[in-house]
Image: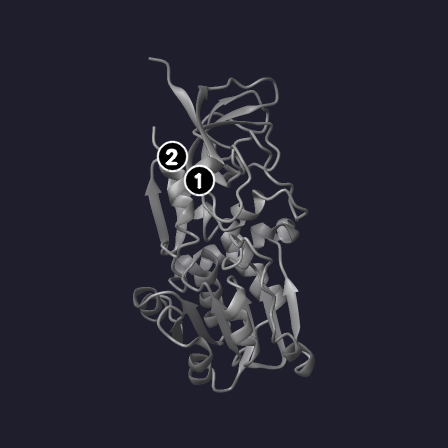
Protein backbone atom coordinates (compact mmCIF):
# COMPACT_ATOMS: atom_id res chain seq x y z
CA UNK A 1 0.00 0.00 0.00
CA UNK A 2 1.42 3.39 -1.02
CA UNK A 3 1.99 5.80 1.87
CA UNK A 4 0.29 9.18 1.52
CA UNK A 5 0.98 12.66 2.82
CA UNK A 6 -1.64 13.73 5.36
CA UNK A 7 -2.34 17.46 5.20
CA UNK A 8 -4.68 20.06 6.67
CA UNK A 9 -5.64 22.85 4.27
CA UNK A 10 -7.62 26.05 4.73
CA UNK A 11 -11.10 25.52 3.28
CA UNK A 12 -12.86 28.72 4.40
CA UNK A 13 -12.02 31.77 6.50
CA UNK A 14 -13.71 31.48 9.88
CA UNK A 15 -15.86 34.12 11.51
CA UNK A 16 -15.16 33.79 15.21
CA UNK A 17 -13.82 30.42 16.26
CA UNK A 18 -12.50 28.03 13.60
CA UNK A 19 -14.80 25.04 13.11
CA UNK A 20 -14.89 21.81 11.14
CA UNK A 21 -15.93 23.86 8.10
CA UNK A 22 -12.66 25.82 8.27
CA UNK A 23 -10.48 22.87 7.25
CA UNK A 24 -9.99 20.27 4.56
CA UNK A 25 -8.23 17.05 5.50
CA UNK A 26 -6.34 15.75 2.46
CA UNK A 27 -4.26 12.68 1.73
CA UNK A 28 -1.98 13.39 -1.23
CA UNK A 29 0.98 11.72 -2.86
CA UNK A 30 4.32 12.33 -1.18
CA UNK A 31 6.18 14.77 -3.44
CA UNK A 32 9.71 14.31 -4.79
CA UNK A 33 12.28 17.12 -4.66
CA UNK A 34 13.46 18.87 -7.82
CA UNK A 35 16.92 20.39 -8.15
CA UNK A 36 17.53 22.81 -5.28
CA UNK A 37 14.85 21.26 -3.08
CA UNK A 38 14.64 18.97 -0.05
CA UNK A 39 11.91 16.66 1.22
CA UNK A 40 11.34 16.92 4.96
CA UNK A 41 9.53 14.35 7.07
CA UNK A 42 7.80 16.46 9.71
CA UNK A 43 8.02 15.15 13.27
CA UNK A 44 6.51 17.97 15.34
CA UNK A 45 4.18 20.87 14.48
CA UNK A 46 4.02 24.04 16.58
CA UNK A 47 0.54 25.29 17.49
CA UNK A 48 0.49 28.99 18.34
CA UNK A 49 -2.18 31.67 18.92
CA UNK A 50 -0.80 33.65 15.97
CA UNK A 51 -2.19 30.97 13.65
CA UNK A 52 -5.68 32.38 14.19
CA UNK A 53 -4.60 35.73 12.80
CA UNK A 54 -3.09 34.07 9.73
CA UNK A 55 -6.58 32.85 8.79
CA UNK A 56 -7.91 36.39 8.34
CA UNK A 57 -7.75 38.12 4.96
CA UNK A 58 -6.38 41.29 6.50
CA UNK A 59 -3.19 43.33 6.50
CA UNK A 60 -0.73 42.07 9.09
CA UNK A 61 2.98 41.46 9.64
CA UNK A 62 2.73 38.34 7.45
CA UNK A 63 0.58 37.36 4.48
CA UNK A 64 -2.58 35.41 5.34
CA UNK A 65 -2.84 31.73 4.52
CA UNK A 66 -4.65 31.41 1.20
CA UNK A 67 -7.76 29.29 0.66
CA UNK A 68 -6.64 25.84 -0.49
CA UNK A 69 -3.14 26.13 0.97
CA UNK A 70 -1.67 23.85 3.62
CA UNK A 71 -2.08 25.57 6.99
CA UNK A 72 1.06 27.47 7.91
CA UNK A 73 2.85 26.28 11.05
CA UNK A 74 6.30 26.01 12.49
CA UNK A 75 7.75 22.52 12.22
CA UNK A 76 10.79 20.44 13.01
CA UNK A 77 11.66 17.34 11.04
CA UNK A 78 14.31 15.36 9.17
CA UNK A 79 15.54 15.65 5.59
CA UNK A 80 14.80 12.32 3.87
CA UNK A 81 15.62 13.35 0.29
CA UNK A 82 17.89 16.16 -0.88
CA UNK A 83 18.81 17.83 -4.13
CA UNK A 84 20.11 20.90 -2.30
CA UNK A 85 23.82 21.54 -1.71
CA UNK A 86 23.29 22.97 1.79
CA UNK A 87 21.24 20.09 3.20
CA UNK A 88 22.03 16.39 3.46
CA UNK A 89 19.80 13.39 4.07
CA UNK A 90 19.59 12.94 7.82
CA UNK A 91 19.79 16.65 8.71
CA UNK A 92 17.23 17.89 11.23
CA UNK A 93 15.65 21.23 10.27
CA UNK A 94 13.19 23.79 11.59
CA UNK A 95 11.04 26.03 9.41
CA UNK A 96 7.45 26.83 8.51
CA UNK A 97 6.52 23.66 6.64
CA UNK A 98 2.85 23.58 7.61
CA UNK A 99 0.46 21.07 9.08
CA UNK A 100 1.44 18.02 7.03
CA UNK A 101 3.57 14.90 7.27
CA UNK A 102 5.93 15.63 4.37
CA UNK A 103 7.02 18.97 2.96
CA UNK A 104 9.06 20.19 0.00
CA UNK A 105 11.33 23.17 0.61
CA UNK A 106 13.84 25.20 -1.36
CA UNK A 107 15.75 25.73 1.86
CA UNK A 108 14.72 29.34 2.43
CA UNK A 109 13.84 29.93 6.06
CA UNK A 110 15.12 26.48 7.02
CA UNK A 111 17.71 26.07 9.75
CA UNK A 112 19.60 23.00 10.87
CA UNK A 113 19.25 21.94 14.51
CA UNK A 114 21.06 19.40 16.66
CA UNK A 115 18.89 16.85 18.52
CA UNK A 116 21.90 16.03 20.70
CA UNK A 117 21.86 19.50 22.24
CA UNK A 118 18.15 19.54 23.07
CA UNK A 119 14.99 17.51 22.37
CA UNK A 120 13.65 18.29 18.90
CA UNK A 121 10.41 19.68 20.31
CA UNK A 122 12.39 22.37 22.19
CA UNK A 123 13.22 23.96 18.84
CA UNK A 124 9.52 24.83 18.52
CA UNK A 125 9.32 26.14 22.10
CA UNK A 126 12.04 27.57 24.31
CA UNK A 127 14.59 27.43 21.48
CA UNK A 128 12.06 28.35 18.79
CA UNK A 129 9.64 31.16 18.00
CA UNK A 130 8.08 31.33 21.50
CA UNK A 131 11.52 31.48 23.06
CA UNK A 132 12.71 34.18 20.68
CA UNK A 133 9.48 36.14 21.23
CA UNK A 134 9.80 36.09 24.99
CA UNK A 135 13.53 36.77 25.05
CA UNK A 136 13.55 39.80 22.77
CA UNK A 137 10.13 41.07 23.79
CA UNK A 138 11.08 41.26 27.45
CA UNK A 139 14.72 42.29 27.19
CA UNK A 140 14.49 44.73 24.27
CA UNK A 141 11.01 46.22 24.73
CA UNK A 142 10.34 45.55 28.41
CA UNK A 143 13.86 46.53 29.52
CA UNK A 144 13.48 45.02 33.01
CA UNK A 145 15.75 46.26 35.77
CA UNK A 146 16.67 44.44 38.96
CA UNK A 147 14.16 45.19 41.71
CA UNK A 148 11.30 46.07 39.34
CA UNK A 149 7.93 44.32 39.24
CA UNK A 150 7.08 42.39 36.09
CA UNK A 151 3.55 41.10 35.41
CA UNK A 152 2.78 38.57 32.68
CA UNK A 153 -0.61 37.53 31.32
CA UNK A 154 -0.97 34.09 29.77
CA UNK A 155 1.90 33.25 32.12
CA UNK A 156 1.56 29.47 31.92
CA UNK A 157 1.83 29.46 28.14
CA UNK A 158 4.91 28.91 26.01
CA UNK A 159 5.94 32.57 25.89
CA UNK A 160 4.71 33.67 29.30
CA UNK A 161 6.49 30.98 31.29
CA UNK A 162 9.79 31.81 29.65
CA UNK A 163 9.33 35.58 30.13
CA UNK A 164 8.74 35.12 33.85
CA UNK A 165 11.83 32.98 34.27
CA UNK A 166 14.02 35.49 32.42
CA UNK A 167 12.62 38.29 34.58
CA UNK A 168 13.56 36.32 37.70
CA UNK A 169 17.07 35.75 36.34
CA UNK A 170 17.30 39.54 35.89
CA UNK A 171 16.40 40.11 39.55
CA UNK A 172 12.77 41.19 39.19
CA UNK A 173 9.69 40.45 41.27
CA UNK A 174 7.46 38.39 38.96
CA UNK A 175 3.68 38.00 39.03
CA UNK A 176 1.93 35.71 36.58
CA UNK A 177 -1.72 35.74 35.52
CA UNK A 178 -3.06 32.32 34.47
CA UNK A 179 -6.25 30.28 34.48
CA UNK A 180 -6.76 27.69 37.20
CA UNK A 181 -5.19 26.70 40.51
CA UNK A 182 -2.91 24.07 38.96
CA UNK A 183 -1.33 26.49 36.51
CA UNK A 184 -0.86 29.16 39.16
CA UNK A 185 0.76 26.69 41.55
CA UNK A 186 3.07 25.56 38.75
CA UNK A 187 4.22 29.14 38.16
CA UNK A 188 5.23 29.52 41.80
CA UNK A 189 6.47 26.02 42.66
CA UNK A 190 8.18 25.07 39.39
CA UNK A 191 9.07 28.30 37.59
CA UNK A 192 9.88 30.41 40.64
CA UNK A 193 7.34 33.21 40.18
CA UNK A 194 6.80 35.31 43.29
CA UNK A 195 3.01 35.26 42.97
CA UNK A 196 0.25 34.15 40.62
CA UNK A 197 -3.28 35.39 39.95
CA UNK A 198 -5.99 32.96 38.88
CA UNK A 199 -8.11 35.05 36.52
CA UNK A 200 -10.79 32.36 36.43
CA UNK A 201 -11.41 32.45 40.17
CA UNK A 202 -10.07 35.81 41.38
CA UNK A 203 -10.81 39.48 40.85
CA UNK A 204 -7.73 40.44 38.85
CA UNK A 205 -7.78 44.12 39.76
CA UNK A 206 -7.97 43.41 43.50
CA UNK A 207 -5.35 40.68 43.25
CA UNK A 208 -2.96 43.06 41.48
CA UNK A 209 -3.17 45.47 44.42
CA UNK A 210 -2.19 42.65 46.76
CA UNK A 211 0.57 41.09 44.66
CA UNK A 212 2.02 44.33 43.27
CA UNK A 213 1.97 46.75 46.24
CA UNK A 214 4.68 48.87 44.61
CA UNK A 215 2.89 48.95 41.25
CA UNK A 216 3.83 47.44 37.89
CA UNK A 217 6.97 48.44 36.00
CA UNK A 218 6.75 45.98 33.10
CA UNK A 219 3.63 44.25 31.77
CA UNK A 220 4.12 41.53 29.17
CA UNK A 221 0.67 41.01 27.66
CA UNK A 222 -0.40 37.89 25.78
CA UNK A 223 -4.13 38.24 26.48
CA UNK A 224 -5.47 41.77 25.99
CA UNK A 225 -9.06 42.71 26.80
CA UNK A 226 -10.10 43.20 30.42
CA UNK A 227 -6.81 41.99 31.86
CA UNK A 228 -4.87 44.66 29.99
CA UNK A 229 -7.32 47.25 31.32
CA UNK A 230 -6.87 45.98 34.88
CA UNK A 231 -3.08 46.12 34.74
CA UNK A 232 -3.10 49.66 33.33
CA UNK A 233 -4.64 50.82 36.61
CA UNK A 234 -1.49 49.69 38.47
CA UNK A 235 1.37 50.84 36.23
CA UNK A 236 4.19 53.00 37.55
CA UNK A 237 5.89 56.09 36.16
CA UNK A 238 7.75 55.20 32.94
CA UNK A 239 6.27 51.69 32.89
CA UNK A 240 6.71 49.54 29.77
CA UNK A 241 3.79 47.55 28.37
CA UNK A 242 4.81 44.92 25.83
CA UNK A 243 1.99 43.85 23.50
CA UNK A 244 2.86 40.32 22.39
CA UNK A 245 -0.66 39.06 21.72
CA UNK A 246 -4.34 39.33 22.58
CA UNK A 247 -5.62 35.78 22.69
CA UNK A 248 -8.84 36.86 24.42
CA UNK A 249 -9.77 38.82 21.28
CA UNK A 250 -8.73 36.58 18.38
CA UNK A 251 -12.06 34.82 17.91
CA UNK A 252 -14.24 37.90 18.44
CA UNK A 253 -17.11 38.44 16.05
CA UNK A 254 -17.25 42.04 17.25
CA UNK A 255 -14.50 44.70 17.03
CA UNK A 256 -11.44 44.10 19.17
CA UNK A 257 -11.81 45.58 22.64
CA UNK A 258 -9.18 48.25 23.20
CA UNK A 259 -8.02 49.51 26.60
CA UNK A 260 -10.40 52.01 28.15
CA UNK A 261 -7.74 52.89 30.74
CA UNK A 262 -5.19 53.96 28.13
CA UNK A 263 -4.92 57.47 29.63
CA UNK A 264 -2.89 55.84 32.37
CA UNK A 265 -0.12 55.75 29.76
CA UNK A 266 -0.27 59.54 29.54
CA UNK A 267 -0.44 60.17 33.28
CA UNK A 268 2.50 57.86 33.96
CA UNK A 269 4.45 58.74 30.80
CA UNK A 270 4.45 55.01 30.11
CA UNK A 271 5.18 53.23 26.85
CA UNK A 272 3.11 50.55 25.09
CA UNK A 273 4.91 48.74 22.29
CA UNK A 274 3.96 45.90 20.00
CA UNK A 275 6.47 43.20 19.14
CA UNK A 276 6.88 40.73 16.27
CA UNK A 277 9.46 38.00 16.65
CA UNK A 278 10.78 38.23 13.07
CA UNK A 279 12.19 41.71 13.77
CA UNK A 280 15.11 40.12 15.62
CA UNK A 281 15.84 37.19 13.30
CA UNK A 282 19.52 38.07 12.87
CA UNK A 283 20.04 37.78 16.62
CA UNK A 284 18.34 34.40 17.14
CA UNK A 285 21.66 32.55 17.60
CA UNK A 286 22.58 34.83 20.51
CA UNK A 287 19.24 34.22 22.22
CA UNK A 288 19.35 30.48 21.62
CA UNK A 289 22.82 30.26 23.13
CA UNK A 290 21.81 32.19 26.26
CA UNK A 291 18.52 30.33 26.73
CA UNK A 292 20.31 27.02 26.18
CA UNK A 293 22.80 28.00 28.87
CA UNK A 294 20.02 28.80 31.33
CA UNK A 295 18.37 25.44 30.68
CA UNK A 296 21.65 23.58 31.10
CA UNK A 297 22.40 25.36 34.38
CA UNK A 298 18.92 24.63 35.74
CA UNK A 299 17.91 28.31 35.86
CA UNK A 300 15.15 27.71 33.30
CA UNK A 301 12.61 24.95 32.78
CA UNK A 302 10.61 24.09 29.69
CA UNK A 303 6.98 22.98 30.00
CA UNK A 304 5.49 21.21 26.99
CA UNK A 305 2.01 19.94 26.15
CA UNK A 306 2.37 17.39 23.35
CA UNK A 307 -0.65 15.87 21.60
CA UNK A 308 -0.15 12.93 19.24
CA UNK A 309 -1.67 12.51 15.79
CA UNK A 310 -1.93 14.95 12.90
CA UNK A 311 -5.59 13.96 12.57
CA UNK A 312 -6.31 15.79 15.84
CA UNK A 313 -5.16 19.18 14.51
CA UNK A 314 -8.48 21.13 14.49
CA UNK A 315 -9.42 20.14 18.04
CA UNK A 316 -5.87 20.46 19.35
CA UNK A 317 -5.53 23.97 17.93
CA UNK A 318 -8.65 25.06 19.81
CA UNK A 319 -7.03 24.09 23.11
CA UNK A 320 -5.09 27.35 22.85
CA UNK A 321 -8.24 29.47 22.89
CA UNK A 322 -9.97 27.49 25.63
CA UNK A 323 -6.99 27.63 27.97
CA UNK A 324 -6.66 23.86 27.92
CA UNK A 325 -2.96 23.64 27.10
CA UNK A 326 -0.41 23.63 29.90
CA UNK A 327 2.88 24.86 28.47
CA UNK A 328 4.01 24.94 24.85
CA UNK A 329 1.38 23.20 22.68
CA UNK A 330 2.90 20.85 20.12
CA UNK A 331 1.39 18.34 17.72
CA UNK A 332 3.42 15.15 17.33
CA UNK A 333 3.00 13.86 13.79
CA UNK A 334 2.43 10.10 13.55
CA UNK A 335 3.67 7.78 10.86
Quadrant assignment, res 4: top left
| Viewer-nearest residue: 9 or 72 | 9
Helix, strand or loop at mark 1:
strand
The residue at the point 61 percent across, 18 percent down is 35
The residue at the point 54 percent across, 28 percent down is 87
| Residue lying furthest bottom | 213
**Marks 1 and 2, how far apart at CA:** 9 Å
* Mark 2, other Cα within 10 Å: few <14 / some 14–19 / many ≥20: many
Which mark's residue is nearer the viewer, 1 or 2?
Answer: 2
Quadrant assignment, res 63: top right
* Mark 1, other Cα within 10 Å: few <14 / some 14–19 / many ≥20: many
**Nearest to N terminus: mark 1 or mark 2:** 1
Helix, strand or loop at mark 2:
helix
Mark identifier at residue 326: none
Q: Which x, y percent locates residue 69?
A: 56, 30
| Viewer-nearest residue: 210 or 174 | 210
In the picture, which quadrant includes the C terminus? top left
For label 1, the residue is 45
Q: Which x, y percent locates residue 56?
A: 59, 44
For label 2, the residue is 310
Asked whether residue 45 appears in the rendered view, the answer is yes
Q: Which x, y percent locates residue 167?
A: 49, 70
Q: Are marks 1 and 2 in contact (CB under 8 Å)?
A: yes
Q: State how many labels appear.
A: 2
Q: Which x, y percent locates residue 152?
A: 48, 68
In the picture, which quadrant includes the N terminus? top left
* In this picture, residue 94 sits left or right of residue 238: left
| Viewer-nearest residue: 222 or 335 | 222
Asked whether residue 117 appears in the rendered view, the answer is no
The colour scheme is one colour
Quadrant assignment, res 229: bottom right
**Is residue 158 depicted above or below 166 in this figure?**
above
Amino acid sequence: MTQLNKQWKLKARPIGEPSADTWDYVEAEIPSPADGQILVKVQYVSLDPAMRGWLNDAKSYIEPVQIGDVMRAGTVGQVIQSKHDAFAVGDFVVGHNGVQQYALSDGKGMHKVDPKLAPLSYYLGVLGMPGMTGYFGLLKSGEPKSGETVVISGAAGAVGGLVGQIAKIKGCTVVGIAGGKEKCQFLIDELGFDAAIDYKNENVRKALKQTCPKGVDVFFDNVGGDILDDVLTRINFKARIVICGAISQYNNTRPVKGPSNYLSLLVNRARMEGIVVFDNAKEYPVAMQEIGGWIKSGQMKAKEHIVEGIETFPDTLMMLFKGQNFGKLILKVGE
